[in-house]
Structure formats: C-alpha cells, structure tokens
Image: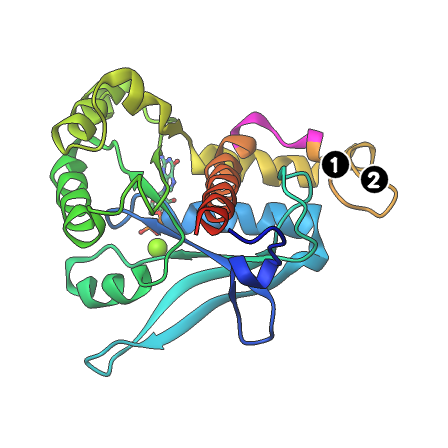
C-alpha cells in the first residue's frame, strides 16, 4: 500500500505521455453508436473546444484489412469528482456487422469501460441478443468486476409499438447473468435518443438567442444542454467516473 499515488502509477500513458482511459461503445450494427459519439463530439466542441484531440482512425486487423472505426479523444471534463489535472479519454465504437468480429476483439483489448448500446427497433431483437452474447463470450468474466459497464437503450423516440419494451431488455440482462433482478438491471440502464439529441443540439446552436447560452469565452454553458443531449452525454461521463473510481480503488488496494 503506497501512500502517494501519482497519476502515472494509476493510468496507462498514451504516445504523447498523457494518461488516458479507453471506453468502448459496443452493440449491434445500426443501433446508434456512431450517432452517440458524434453528438458527444459536437457537444464537446462547443463546450470545451480545446480538449478535443482527434476523431476517426483506422487500423489494420490481423487479416491485413484496413478498417475504420470511430475514436474521439477528449480531456477529462472538469468536475468529475477527482482531481486529475490532465487525463485523456478515448471513446471508441466498433463496427457491428458480423464480419468485423476480429476488429471488435482488437478494439476491446485494453478497454477500461464499456457501454453496450441496444437497438430497441422490433426487428433488431435477435441482433441485440447476438451482440450481447458475443460480448459476454469475449469479456463476460470481467463485466461489472474489473470492467465497469453501462447499458444504453437508444431510439426511445420510436413509438412504443415499434420498440421492444425496456422490460424485455431487463429480462435479457438477468437471463445473461449480468443482473440479479430488474431493479439492479435498471440501475445500469440509460434511455436515450441520439436522433432527438442531435436535432435539439443543432436547433440550439442555430437559435437566434444562442449568445445567451454562451459563457464569456464563447463556450456553451454546461447548464444549457437540452435534456436529450444530457442523456446522450450521461453514459460516457458516468462510465468515466466509474472507471476513475475503480482504477483509483484498485491502485490503492494493490
Ligand atoms: N429513430 C432513431 N434513429 C436513430 C437513433 N440513433 C441513430 N439512429 C439512426 O440509426 C441509423 C444507424 O445509426 P449509427 O449511429 O450509424 O449506428 P451504428 O451502426 O451503431 O454506428 C442511422 O440512420 C441513424 O440516423 C435514435 O435515437 N432514434
Ligand atoms: Mg457506426
């Protein structure tokens, strides 16, 4: 037990010497993973323009093919409950199509936290189950233990008759051994509409009275986030906090 932990004792260090977190957004194809990272990217650009480093990267998978994936790198927003002066976090999404299995495996490596995004569109049920099953086969032992995770139910703007009800997803989480009961399962779930968030963010940024929502540096004030936008930011910001708490705890315990 060391009394003085420095940041570099706790976090991994990226190529330019800055500690970082890696968050992966996982889920079936067309669920809204890219939309989520895009909305968050736009939000960060208007709230904290100087904290964004990059987006959209490519890798060569082990079979030699080049695949693009979404990656955004931000500095940790202030007020996350921990005093880390400079910490990057990377948000990655993976391609959901079945043929990109190897890429998903590679992207999951070194993940510090996971967001699983469900698509409640009625005809997507099997794809959700398949994607969750795959994730559990790759990371099941660690989920909720060494690997913090959250569940997102996206597309809540769809009318109820076109959506699988939230309840059925809670049952799935229990059936897959991720939760003991519906209350526990629901604690991990955040309901979003990336579509609504994108529209409301764009409307806000184009509105004639936008100036009243900006601070003295021309940045969007945090309190100005529309609720739908806050909901989309929440999983990323909440998992960040959980990861930091988890990492600090395990570093102290070792
Ligand atoms: N109705 C609805 N459509 C959405 C929502 N989020 C994303 N979409 C749409 O779903 C499709 C797939 O989104 P995308 O972000 O590319 O999914 P990905 O494959 O998981 O990265 C696009 O046509 C989006 O416009 C949402 O919250 N509601
Ligand atoms: Mg995508």
Q: Quadrant of residue 85?
A: bottom right
Q: In the image shown, does 35 or 82 lie closer to the viewer?
A: 82
Q: Point out residue 100 in the picture as x, y percentages from the top left corner.
A: 20, 64
Is 191 covered by the magenta stretch?
A: no
Task: Estimate the spatial distance between the alpha carbons at disc 2 and disc 1, rounded to whole Å.
Answer: 6 Å
In this view, 172 is above or below 9? above
Which disc, if any, is residue 250? none
Residue positioned 24% across, 54% down in the render = 96
Q: In the image shown, does 129 or 154 lie closer to the viewer?
A: 129
Q: Residue furthest bottom?
A: 64
Q: Which residues are magenta?
A: 223-228
Is there CB contact under 8 Å for labels 2 and 1?
yes
- Left or right: where 198 falls relative to 156: right
Q: Which residue is mark 1?
A: 221
Residue positioned 18% across, 54% down in the render = 138
Which disc, if any, is residue 215? 2
Q: Considering only order in the chain, which callout, 1 or 2, is on the residue closer to the N terminus? A: 2
**Badge 1: few (under 14), some or many (20 or more) residues near its Cα, within 10 Å?**
some
- Can the viewer see residue 20 in this picture? yes
Q: How many marks?
A: 2
């Amino acid at each position: 037990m060391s009394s003085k932990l420095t940041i570099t004792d706790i976090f991994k260090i990226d190529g330019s010497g800055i500690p970082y977190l890696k968050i992966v957004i996982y889920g079936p194809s067309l669920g809204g993973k890219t939309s989520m990272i895009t909305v968050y990217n736009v939000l960060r650009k208007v709230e904290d323009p100087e904290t964004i480093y990059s987006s959209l990267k490519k890798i060569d998978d082990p079979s030699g093919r080049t695949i693009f994936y979404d990656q955004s790198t931000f500095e940790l927003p202030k007020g996350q409950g921990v005093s880390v002066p400079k910490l990057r976090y990377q948000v990655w999404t993976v391609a959901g199509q079945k043929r990109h299995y190897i890429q998903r495996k590679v992207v999951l490596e070194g993940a510090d936290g996971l967001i699983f995004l469900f698509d409640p569109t009625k005809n997507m049920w099997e794809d959700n189950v398949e994607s969750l099953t795959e994730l559990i086969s790759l990371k099941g032992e660690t989920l909720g233990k060494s690997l913090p995770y959250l569940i997102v139910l996206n597309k809540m703007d769809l009318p109820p008759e076109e959506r699988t009800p939230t309840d059925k997803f809670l049952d799935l989480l229990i059936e897959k051994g991720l939760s003991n009961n519906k209350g526990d399962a629901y604690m991990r779930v955040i309901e979003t509409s990336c579509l609504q968030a994108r529209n409301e963010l764009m409307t806000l940024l184009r509105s004639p009275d936008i100036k009243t929502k900006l601070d003295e540096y021309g940045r969007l004030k945090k309190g100005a986030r529309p609720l739908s936008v806050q909901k989309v930011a929440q999983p990323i910001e909440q998992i960040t906090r959980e990861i930091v708490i988890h990492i600090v705890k395990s570093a102290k315990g070792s």
